[in-house]
Amino acid sequence: MMTITNPVIPYVTGLPGGCLQVGSMIIVHGQPTFNCNRFCVSLVCGPQPELGDIAFQLTAHFDTNWVIRNSKINKEWGVEEGTATRKFPFQRLQPFQLEIFTSSSCYVVAIDGNHYCEYAHRVSYSQANTLQITGDVQVSTVEFRSTNTYPTFPSGNRLNVANPPIPFASSINGPLSVGNEIQIHGQVKPHPNRFHINLQQGCQSPPSPTIVFHFNPRYEGGNRVIVMNSLLGGQWGSEQRIASGRLLAPGTTFVLIIRRQAYNFEILINATTIAHYAHRIGADIVDSVTIDGDVIVGKVVAI
């Protein structure tokens, strides 16, 4: 697996391994800009998108609320395809996860964990060796994987909430087992004091709940620090602190992942691991997530 963080748009990069193969998965975590007109994700044959064939191009048109797919062969565009399993899936300023999976017969596209469309190969996938992203979009991460699972993160019946009000509290609709994770797509407010995310038993507010993991970025006095802790039996434990530096800076967008491992929680920001927090109590009791403070949340997902 290879991950690119915060690429500058327009963005062009060669594909790992030199070209697409059956099982190749490209995952784009992004957010359309506030005045987005359109953005494109293209799989290009050759290193220069303006010269080579385009095996597959997906374009989100906000003026018509339509997602168009097409190919360019010998400098000629083919017939556009626009059918899909559901209505226009993107919103300005709302985070999305776009997955493009390569099968032997077609590209298969999922958006936010749900199947969206298929696109039969017009050019052999083995000729596609370059990814291009253009248009009115901010991208936090691009992941390249090889997998036999599609969608990579099926939404199922787990928690999947968009634009929740803050404070937020919800069940995660199932156990937080080893390998499961909570994803928060959000934006730090421009002038924050602090915010927190709790993985806990039940949705109650302190001091009553058992908080297995407390994630608390603080900004007071210009000092940026992330505090992690647990609330057990009504008592906070010893704090684990890390300097946040430019992580979660005021006004920035982020994808925060809290992943349960066998002996700790792994914390990732924009696909980069920033810390591990050892379990102080069995994580099997986690059944809820709560969020409060100076943060705008675009999406909360339990996987």
Image (spheres, helix red, strand yellow):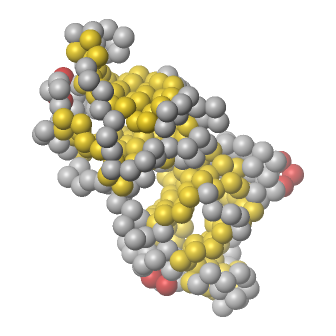
Q: Quadrant of the N terminus?
A: top left
Measuring 25% from the left and 42% from the top, which residue is drawn there? 118
Relative image position of residue 252 (x, y in whole percent)? 67, 42
Counting labels gives 0
Relative image position of residue 257 (x, y in whole percent)? 51, 58
Q: Is residue 271 above or below residue 277?
A: above
Measuring 33% from the left and 44% from the top, which residue is drawn there? 84
Relative image position of residue 246 (x, y in whole percent)? 67, 42
Relative image position of residue 24 (x, y in whole percent)? 24, 41
Q: Is residue 214 above or below residue 62?
A: below
Q: Is residue 36 visible?
A: yes
- Determine whether, in the image, residue 239 is placed left or right of residue 124: right
Who is closer to the viewer here, 114 or 219?
114
Q: Quadrant of the C terminus?
A: bottom left
> Which quadrant of the structure image shows residue 242?
bottom right
Who is closer to the viewer here, 187 or 211?
187
Q: Residue furthest right?
A: 221
Q: Is residue 297 above or below residue 82?
A: below
- Determine whether, in the image, residue 236 is placed left or right of residue 183: right
- Determine whether, in the image, residue 291 is placed left or right of residue 182: right
Measuring 54% from the left and 63% from the top, which residue is drawn there? 161
Q: Is residue 235 above or below residue 60?
A: below
Measuring 30% from the left and 27% from the top, which residue is drawn there? 80
Q: Is residue 196 visible?
A: no
Q: Residue furthest left?
A: 104
